[in-house]
Image (cartoon, rainbow, N blue to C red):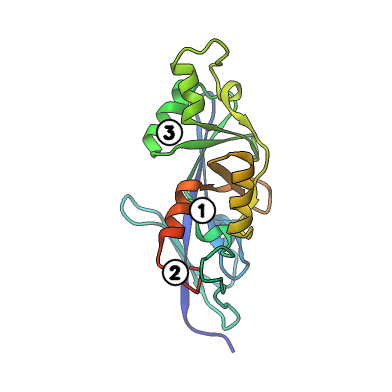
Amino acid sequence: MTSNQTIECGIGVREILSGDGGVRRRLMVHCEPQHEAVYVATCTVCPRCLGIRAPGEETPGAVICRSSDDDEPTVTDDLGMRTPVRAVMERDVACVTADVSVDALVALLIRRGASAAAVVDEDGHPVGIVSWSDCLRVRAGAADAGRNAADVMTPMVFSVTETTELSRAIDLMADGGFHQVPVVMGDGSVGGMLSTREVVRWLARPRQHLAP
């Protein structure tokens, strides 16, 4: 039997800044029925989609779906360490291509209030991470510092998916000494970012038995 209840799936925005100053944006949403991230454009042909609320200046966007009795919440342990990454990650993510200048990158990080950005190829697949520390090497006038994201980024070592358990992601980040890691969608493109800041915020929350 199908339920008449509805669920709202929050929309995230992936913004890719190119070296020529162009910006490409894609709207993404975590599809609860499919348990994975999809592009919002695909929701328009889904029979369970009831409507789309576009993101506003003060209100987040959402895809309104018809829920089913088969949609069960994900049960986690008391500490939340088996929680999937999708419950913790940042969905509005800033990305840049390798030819973006460090000056443009710094401006982007300031505007977004972000500590790092994923460096991606033309298809949005991650090739590296560039952080404030990387940018400061240039600002400090280090002799070996470059001028573009490709020159200062840390090459991509690993990424995680939305279904990766938080404990596994934490282990990978700790072993590699990374404070941020891209979260990739099914097509391998960036769909979000997991940071130690978000992990700490999650672990500091009151214990819950159900993941959001």
Q: Nearer the viewer, residue 51 or 196?
A: 196
Question: Which residue in the structure is indicated by mark 3?
Answer: 109
Residue at 58% from the left image edge and 13% from the top image edge: 144
Looking at the picture, which amino acid does disc 2 mark?
Arg
Mark toward the start of the polypeptide (2 vs 3): 3
Q: Nearer the viewer, residue 91 or 24?
A: 91
Which disc, if any, is residue 63?
A: none
What is the x, y in percent for residue 163?
Answer: 63, 60
Label 1: state its secondary structure. Answer: loop
Mark toward the start of the polypeptide (1 vs 2): 1
Cα distance in 3D space between marks 1 and 2: 18 Å
**Callout 3 crowding tier (Cα within 10 Å): few <14, some 14–19, many ≥20:** some
Mark 1 or 2: the one toward you:
2
Which disc, if any, is residue 89?
A: 1
Cα distance in 3D space between marks 2 and 3: 32 Å
| Residue 3 seen | yes
**Callout 1 crowding tier (Cα within 10 Å): few <14, some 14–19, many ≥20:** many
Question: Which residue in the structure is indicated by mark 2?
Answer: 207
What is the x, y in percent for residue 7?
Answer: 47, 72
What is the x, y in percent for residue 109?
Answer: 42, 33
**Callout 2 crowding tier (Cα within 10 Å): few <14, some 14–19, many ≥20:** few
Residue 24 as seen in the image, left or right of residue 156:
left
Looking at the picture, which amino acid does disc 3 mark?
Leu
Q: Is residue 117 positioned above or below 160 on the image?
A: above
Residue placed furthest toward the left? 58
Mark toward the start of the polypeptide (3 vs 1): 1
| Residue 124 seen | no
What is the x, y in percent for residue 160?
Answer: 64, 50
Specify the quadrant of the image occupied by residue 155. Answer: top right
